[in-house]
Amino acid sequence: MTDTVLSLLFVCHVLQLKFLVDGMLGRLCRWLRCLGIDAEFVGKHPGVLELAQMASDAARQGRVFLTRDARLAARRDCWGAFLLNSDDPEEQLAEVSAHFNIT
C-alpha cells in the first residue's frame, strides 16, 4: 500500500469520515470500501434535484458527498460536496487525501 492510502485509512478511522459517492465514481467507492472506509454508493441514476437532496441529507448525517459533476457540486442546495477532478481512482484517492489534509 502507498503512504497516501495508509494515511487516508488511518484518518478515516480516527475521524470516522463517511462518504456518499456519486455513481460516476464506482471504482473509487470500491477502493474506499476495501480500505474499510464507510462509503455509500449512489448506484441508481437519480435526477439532479434528487441527487442534490441526497447530498444535503448525507451532509446532515456527517457524510461527505464525492462527485465529479462540477455543476452539481456548485449548486446551493447541494452542500457538503467535494469535487474530484481526476478520472483515475488512485489519483482520486490522492485528491481526497490532500483535501482532508492527510499526510
Image (cartoon, rainbow, N blue to C red):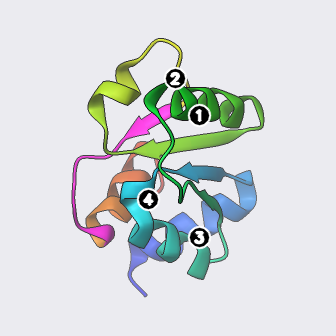
Q: Secondary structure at mark 2?
A: loop
> Which of label 2 and label 3 is nearer to you?
2
Q: Which amino acid, mark 2?
A: Cys
Q: Is residue 97 above or below residue 52?
A: below
Residue at horizontal 67 percent and vertical 76 percent from the top: 36
> Which of label 1 and label 4 is nearer to you?
1
Residue at horizontal 53 percent and vertical 41 percent from the top: 65
Q: Report, in whole angstroms, how far the alpha carbon at label 1 lies from the one at label 4.
A: 27 Å
* Magenta segment includes 8: no
Q: Which amino acid, mark 3?
A: Leu
Q: Secondary structure at mark 3?
A: helix
Q: Which amino acid, mark 4?
A: Thr
Q: Secondary structure at mark 1?
A: helix
Q: Secondary structure at mark 4?
A: loop
Counting labels gives 4
> Which of label 3 and label 1 is nearer to you?
1
- Magenta segment range? 81-89
Give the quadrant of the C terminus. Answer: bottom left
> Counting residues from the N terminus, which is met first, the one under dot 2 or under dot 4?
2
Determine which residue is flagged by label 1.
55
> Counting residues from the N terminus, which is met first, the one under dot 3 or under dot 1?
3
Picture quarter containing residue 5?
bottom left
Determine which residue is flagged by label 4.
103
